[in-house]
Amino acid sequence: MNLSNHLMDRATADSDVSVWDLPIVSEGEAASVATDPKTLLPTAEDIETIQRQAYQEAYDEAYEKAKSEAYAEGKAEGKKNGYEAGKEEGYAHGLGEGKAVIEEKSRQLSALISMLTTPLAKLDDEVEAELMALVMLVARHIIRRELKQNPSHVIAAIRQAVNILPVGTQNIILFLHPDDAELVRESLSFRDEDEQRWKIIEDPMLTRGGCKVETKNSRIDASVESQINSVVAQVLGSERGDDHAVSPDKP
């Protein structure tokens, strides 16, 4: 409520006060207005009311302004703090996820390398075994060809095997390939008394150039395959030599 309205309300409420209307004057006449001794003036109560209203209006205006400024400032500060907190939290979260991804990729890479390495190691073993088998096959064919061209090698093999036996050993059984058996009979020229000491048994399963010797207490394998396997074992070691052992061929 403003001052004019307040005075009008008081005038209407006061029965002793009449509202003064502007007198009608003709054109050219000077109007004289007498001063009414009862002209309305603000009382102390009116002034106090006006002051209270002005103070309240100023207070409300200042309060709203301060609240608005505080809200804007708080919003800006909160946004800043929230941004900083969010930034730190996001960085920490992203760093953790990044580390987890790197560790997972590292494990996958290690597994992949292991998968690639294992077949290669297995392939190396397989290639080595195949190459060794091929070498043994070639060596055996070369030896067989050499024995065919020079059959006297079997005599050396027999003598080497027999020399292992104790002196004076009787009843020696000599296993030979049929072709080698005929050659040995002709070369050694067994006499009748040798029949008590020697006995030749033909074994077509033996490769030419080798033999086997048996007695009552002994057994000597001097076959070509056994001699090759012995050489392989010395070169590669006993365990791996057994892996690459040569089997006899059929004649």
Image: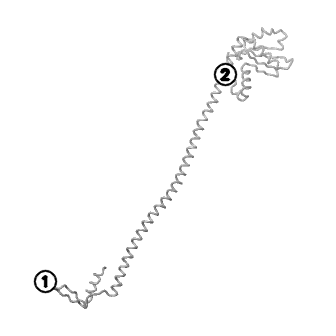
The amino acid sitting under disc 2 is Val
Q: Quadrant of residue 54?
A: bottom left
The colour scheme used to paint the residues is: one colour
Residue lying furthest right: 168
Label 1: element kind? loop
- Residue with the mark numbered 2: 135
The relative height of residue 196 versus residue 26 in the rendered view (above or below) is above
- On the picture, is 140 further left or further right than 217? left
Viewer-proximal residue among 111 and 6: 6
Depth check, front residue: 240 or 95: 95
Task: Name the image quarter holding residue 114.
Answer: top right
Q: Circles 1 and 2: CB distance less than 8 Å?
A: no
Residue 58: image location, x then y, percent: 37, 76
Tell us which disc is closer to us: 1 or 2: 1
Of the 4 image quadrants, the one containing the C terminus is top right
Asked whether 215 or 80 is in front, the reply is: 80
Which residue shows up at 63% across the image and 30% down it? Answer: 124
Task: Provide residue 60's location: percent of width, then percent of height.
Answer: 38, 75
Disc 1 packing (10 Å; few <14; some 14–19; many ≥20): few
Which residue sits at x=70%, y=13%? 146
| Label 2 neighbour load within 10 Å: few <14, some 14-19, many 20+ | few
Tell me which corner region of the image, top left, top right, bottom left or bottom right, holds residue 236. Answer: top right
Q: Which mark is residue 157?
A: none
Q: Position of residue 185 (x, y in %)?
A: 78, 10
Q: Position of residue 89 (x, y in %)?
A: 52, 56
Report helix, strand or loop for mark 2. helix
Give the Cα separation between the discs numbered 1 and 2.
Answer: 150 Å
Q: Amino acid at mark 1?
A: Gly
Q: Is residue 168 left or right of residue 30?
A: right
> Relative to 14, does residue 54 appear above or below in the rendering?
above
Q: Mark 1 — residue? A: 28
Vertical order, 7 against 72 (above or below):
below
